[in-house]
Amino acid sequence: MCGSLPRGAVTQDVPSPRYRLTLLGRFGLSGPHGPVELQNKKLAGLLAHLACTAPAPNPRGKLATLLWGSHFDTQARQNLRQALFRLRQALGQDLIIGDGDDISLAPGVIDCDATRFRALIRGGTRASLAEALGLYKECLLSDVNISEQAWVYWLTGERQRLEELALDGLVRIGEIELAAGHPHKALEKAHRAVAINNLREDAHRLVIQGLAAAGRKAEALKHYQNLVLLLERELNAKPDAATDLVVAELDGAWQRSRARAVGEIPKPALPQGNQPPCAWALVDTHRVSAECHLVTGDQVLPLGVIGSGRPERRQLTIMVCNKVSSTPLSATRDPEELRDRVGAFHKAVADTVVRFDGFIAQYLSDGVVVYFGYPVAHEDDAERAVRAGIAVLDAIRSLKTSFAVALRARIGIASGLVVVVEQRGSGDTRHRVAFGETPNLATQLQAVAAAGEIVVAASTRRLVGRMFDCCPLAADECSGLPQLVEAWQVRGETAQGR
């Protein structure tokens, strides 16, 4: 069902669903007497959003911004009231629970395929995964197009989250089939995952393993070769260590088989410890060593850097926070005092953003980069980022009593689609790096912010709606930004956002 039961509720008191709602693919709604037609796309969008977020309530202001954000606030709220009235008329007065400012669907009235899909994926068994993947036919609401920025951002993020669940399910059930000795079924699932997202490396790895298990080792190595070229072209990245090891073992077994056929010496064992895997290949019946490379035919391809992670496409809100002091820190004569100041700044930012589920991606000498929406995505990541920024400024201001030189901070925040890659640093350290325009824009916005200010991109401003008091930056204040970049200064929370 679209909403879980309240704690303490008695299961048998909840009626069976009167309506079935299809969101995975084209919008569809059916009731006891057959299909139900809603009057317009925004009614469908409102019902879909309430179903996808159930049982959590939605503030009226948020719903008004979601579907009528381009209207004045009074008109947007009036449109929302009319839409709720029409939904109750069409589907029953008990469909929607309105508790003051909060709106939610009544539990047990609607059976929603998107919610069942999530629950089945979480089940993790072969049966539940198969049923879930049977529900996932297309992306969410493929036919509901609403020209409001808040809707577009929500729908994009929700589609991405469901797509990731589908990909996780396809790879997991493929691994189960492979372990059960059904390589052809594993290949079917792996190819479907690759068709959805051809940058999903664990799906490609499953293709390689499935081909090898089916006795098609030459095709498996060719698939790996194509994967290397794809990652290099699209992400400027290399396959991760898990894929390298699978291919090194596969290539070793294949070459040992060929070596026996042509009287060559078998390939030695793979290196142990932290040494990178080596691949060996036969070229014109001569054994060629290629450390960290795979030799196939007349091409030499890198096997990748151990520790590089699988790229993930994410909708993130990124905060860049830099410290600003009334006296340049380079003028500090005591290095230990400088270290203490920087450490206190980093700690204040980290202790604050963690309360809003911010992920510290990188510490800089004079700043911190924080991701909201990674590793766990929330629907309100943009709001969390802005609230965290306000709290960070307060926390930094409180540090001035501890040092002779007062510290202040300036913050830039931007939202958008990025690719997150895990990269290996020195020793055993790992860094998560987001590639795309969003981190660059957040850095540029931070640079134009004054001390004690937060500047957000228009993408973030649209997502937070009217929860914060924002004013557009003047043209002279945007001189450090690329043309056509719209930026807003955050003054504080509105009454609606509190």
Image (tube, rainbow, N blue to C red):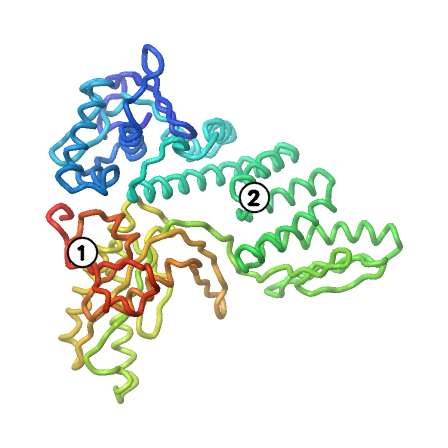
Q: Position of 108 compared to 286: left or right?
A: left
The residue to which callout 1 is attached is 470
**Secondary structure at numbered mark 1:** strand
Q: What residue do we see at 19% from left, 20% from top? A: 94
Q: Find the residue positioned furthest to the right.
A: 263
Callout 2 environment at 10 Å: few (<14), some (14 to 19), or many (20+)?
Answer: many
Q: Find the residue positioned furthest to the bottom.
A: 333
Q: Position of residue 149 (x, y in %)?
A: 30, 44
Measure the C-alpha gap from mark 1 to mark 2: 43 Å
Callout 1 environment at 10 Å: few (<14), some (14 to 19), or many (20+)?
Answer: many
- Residue 192 against residue 109 in the figure, above or below: below
Q: Nearer the viewer, residue 75 or 245?
A: 75
Amino acid bearing label 2: Ala
Of callouts 1 and 2, which one flags the residue occurring earlier in the amino acid sequence? 2
- Residue 303 against residue 314 in the figure, above or below: below
Q: What residue do we see at 71% from left, 38% from top? A: 214
| Residue 36 appears in view | yes
The residue to which callout 2 is attached is 203
Q: Position of 278 compared to 36: left or right?
A: right
- Residue 362 against residue 205 in the figure, above or below: below
Q: What residue do we see at 51% from left, 56% from top? A: 309
Q: What residue do we see at 46% from left, 51% from top? A: 312
| Residue 348 appears in view | no
Q: Position of residue 128 (x, y in %)?
A: 47, 28
Q: Position of residue 372 (x, y in %)?
A: 32, 54
